Amino acid sequence: MSVHEPTGNTPDSVNTKDATLPVHAQSREVEPAVLDGELVAEPPGPVYERPKINRLVSRWLRSPRVPRYLKDRRQAAQAGKDLLAAILRSPLRYMGAVVRGIVAAARWWRQWVTVRDYREAAEQAEKLADKFAEIRALTLFRWKVTGAVAVAVAAALLVADLVHGPRALWIAGGGVSVALAILGRRREGSPGRKAVLAGPRTLTWTMDPQILVDAFRDAKLIGKDETLRLVERAARVGDGWAITVDLPATRKAADVIKNRDALASALAVDEVQLIVERVRGNGGHAGRVAMWVADQDPYASPPVRTPLLPMERWDAWRPVPFGRDARNRRVDLPLVWTSLLVGAIPRQGKTFAARLAAAGLILDPHTRLYVADFKAGKDWDAAAAVAHRFMSGDESEHARMLIGWLVELISEVQDRYRRMRALDDSICPESKVTPAMSRDPSLNMPITAIFIDEVQVPLEDRSPVTVEGKKLTAGEYVGELLTWLAKKGPAAGIVLVLATQRPDSKTIPSGLRAVLGSRFALRVMDWRDSNIILGEQMNTRGYDSSRLLASHKGVGILRPDGDSEAGADVLAVMVRTYYMPNEDWQTICQRGRALREAEGTLTGHAAGQDTTPVPDHAAAAKAIGAGNASSRADWRVHELPEPLASVVDYLGADLEPDGREFVPTAELTEALDLEATTLAQQMSELGCQPTRYRIPTEDGETRRVRGYLTAEIRAAIERVAADEISSSDDARGDRP
């Protein structure tokens, strides 16, 4: 755009550079100058080609042949530090090479002068006695040669000193030292390069690439003829060293992660000090590994208090600060649109972890909380000040109260889906609750979280419940209700957080575990329990919470939801949860109550309106589906013969179609206290034949064992039920 000058010739123009006006202009008012302009399109200029320098820079940055330290400033700075360190260490390294060269030369001379090769050949041919005279004569001759050479060298040095002075001696000494240093340089397999007496292995982590290559070879992660390619130079990150390497072709980063303990042993560090991650995304591939080695145990220091304590409020849609990893990086846990399972043996920090997840939601006044404490302690009592529903107890009546809550939530989820379908696309673009919808009082769709501590108590409750004419236990009904909520609740704004100290297949139904998005496993007793929490075969991928140390309280393996930012690039991460003692927990709950009172969102139990909901079991059964709600109950309607009845009782939820595929015979015989031959004979009579099946082992391998497919067991149950129904029909037909 160009702007033209003012048009017209005005004799009485104003000089803007001079404050004095002409005399004839002072008698009248001066009209302001008017700028007259128009928009004019710039004529298209010539199209210039991209400068060659830019093309060269682009090729330089994209070229795989250019080292990383010539592309990245951080890597270039680290390369400069490494060069300076190498220069400072070079005198000591040179002296060490010379000493090793002297040792290697002395050993070589000793073998030569003692005719070691000739002697060993005679020993192998069993002719040492016959060759003794020849060996002795050759030995004396080589001693004479050694003496003659020594005298000649001494004479030559003396003459050179007399002719040229001490300079000749220095030159000769320098040449000899260089030769010895070359001879004594570290080469794998060469004699004289390793200590004769091996002491304790320690890691002098100068991040020499050869140290890393040797460690990978010792751990059998690469072959003896293979090496590593350095992607990023070793650099200090926090209290440890970080390095990124590429494995040889066909080698996978997943194998390195799985064999992390072997690599840690090769590096002479504890496995908790070694963090191995696969590099994902555009800058990574299946064979690129990022490693971090801590100087000391990263979990030996005191835990860090939760950063939520000084916060006045929190947004539930933001991931909750959950803990820190070994590199002291903050790990956040997303809760909206997912669910969480926390499992551990007693006194490992399970309740603390669940309360950390609850703290972020408590500080958002637009959330609604259901809290069920089946531990019947006082760990969750402070949450009663903010909870819409709250109870603490471990009796059957509390399990039935939980059933009422769950049925109420199922009705709420169905109502939300119906109302979201009627909303405009600008308000609800998908069938999901949005942040604006969750804070709109007129819609009444707040983020609603239900926390159940010691969830194994209601799941194992055996008190009878009748649902639509079907009899089943309260635990079975709770499992079905929780499974439905975990499947359909997250999109409607329902967050499910379950904590248990008994993570076994009988306690947590497999159908429920399969739909829980996020998992957090603190220390457990067995790798099978770890897999129940984290997922099948997670131990074969290098994630086994049974290997955690008992002294590491609050340290666990977090497997975040894959759809969240926290779980986009990593399968799982070891986390030490933040520390939140009871006084901090009470402070956060009191602050959450004050926020709700100010916003007018205090409801239910916290507002003194604790009314027990009347459960609509018919609607819940219809929502869940008669087949899912009563499948296991139908099995128990019929009188199953032994040992089939005991097998059904033992497997429980694992017999569901989405449960276990196979159960070993050894597991059944141990659980049912039967002999293998007796079990095989009785099961065969019922039409259930054993088979061989491959299962993963603790060391990551697979082995074939004998056992039964759960599909075959279900088929046997259906045959028995059909026979019983047929017999009852025949009996009714014969009745007069």
Image: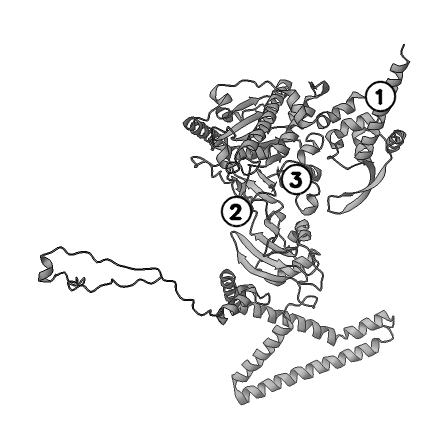
Q: Which residue is mark 3?
A: 534
Secondary structure beneath label 3: helix
Would residue 346 be visible to someone looking at this image? no
Distance between the alpha carbons at the discs numbered 1 and 3: 41 Å
Across and down, in percent, residue 295 comes to 55, 52
Picture disc at residue 725: 1
Secondary structure beneath label 2: loop
**Front of the two marks 1 and 3:** 1
198 or 443, nearer to the observer = 443
Question: In the visual, does 86 lie left or right of 246?
Answer: left
> From the viewer's perspective, is residue 69 above or below residue 376?
below
Q: Which residue is mark 2?
A: 329
Q: Are marks 2 and 1 in contact (CB under 8 Å)?
A: no
Across and down, in percent, residue 299 comes to 56, 44
Q: Are marks 1 and 3 in contact (CB under 8 Å)?
A: no
Amino acid beneath label 3: Leu
Amino acid beneath label 2: Arg
- The structure residue drawn at horizontal position 81% and vertical position 77%, both measured from the top left corner, is 135
Distance between the alpha carbons at the discs numbered 2 and 3: 22 Å
Neighbour class for label 2 at 10 Å: few (<14), some, many (≥20)? few
Neighbour class for label 3 at 10 Å: few (<14), some, many (≥20)? many
- The structure residue drawn at horizontal position 24% and vertical position 63%, both measured from the top left corner, is 7
Q: Earlier in the sequence, mark 1 or mark 3?
A: 3
Neighbour class for label 1 at 10 Å: few (<14), some, many (≥20)? few
Amino acid beneath label 1: Ile
